[in-house]
Amino acid sequence: MAHNVPAREIRAVYTDETVTVYQAYGPHIGLPAARDGRFPAAWKRERMTWVKPSFRWMMYRCGWGEKPGQETVLAVEISREGLGWALRNAALSHHDAAVHPDRETWRAALRAAPTRVQWDPERDLRLRPLGHRSLQLGLSGEAVRRYADEWIVSIRDVTPLAHEIHALVRAGALDRATALLPPERPYPVAEADVSHLLPSRPAGPSGSV
């Protein structure tokens, strides 16, 4: 990874109309979701659900699809309009003194927001932390409903891809593993979608915030 990647940047697979995020579930949820293109009744709408545009961060979280309850890795293609709504209606998951004047202001924003933004260290192929961070979005309440009923365009089971890349990493074939990674690139973020999550300055280029 280039050394000049912005400290916080949304990198994703996207088209003119959609962006791909990742989740991992047990087979009882993941397999019917991929088959039907929507989440089954066993998927709990009242719980917060986290989505991640970074494939490698998802691999870190689910252990390449080998952690209990996360054996099915899903690539969920959602509308870019939906992601924009999620960002516009988000609050930071942790207090940032450069964004909020005090902790109570931050707590009030967090209580009111249906979406949480969290920045976690990006991972390399060996799942070691890198010096820049990757976006996680926590969806709750109205955001969960919109995600399930309005934003989803398609759901694919990418567990075989996760296992194939993992096998190459274990074999030391990092170049071949890298070639199989989803082609993520900086995601263009509208300043209006993220200005409330940032210190008082313009948003950076492309997906950097």
Image: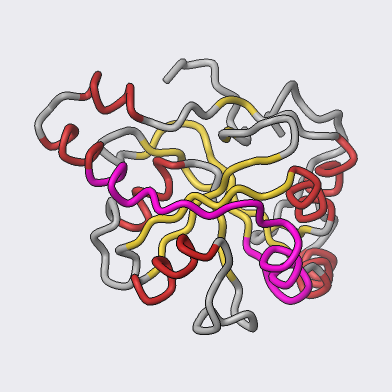
Q: Where is the C terminus found, in terms of image quarters? A: top right
How far across and how far down the image is residue 192, in percent? 90, 40
Residue in the image at 65% along x and 61% along y: 93
Left or right: 29 in relation to 162: right
Quarter of the figure with residue 181: top left
How far across and how far down the image is residue 151, in percent? 72, 56
Name the residue furthest left. Answer: 171
Most foreground residue, 118 or 72: 72
Q: Is 80 part of what is drawn in magenta? A: no
Residue in the image at 29% along x and 56% along y: 65
Residue 8 makes an appearance in the image = no
Q: Where is the N terminus found, in terms of image quarters? A: top left
Residue 143 makes an appearance in the image = yes
Residue in the image at 46% along x and 60% along y: 34
Residue in the image at 69% along x and 40% along y: 18
Image: magenta residue range: 138-163
How far across and how far down the image is residue 89, in percent? 83, 58
Most foreground residue, 44 or 153: 153
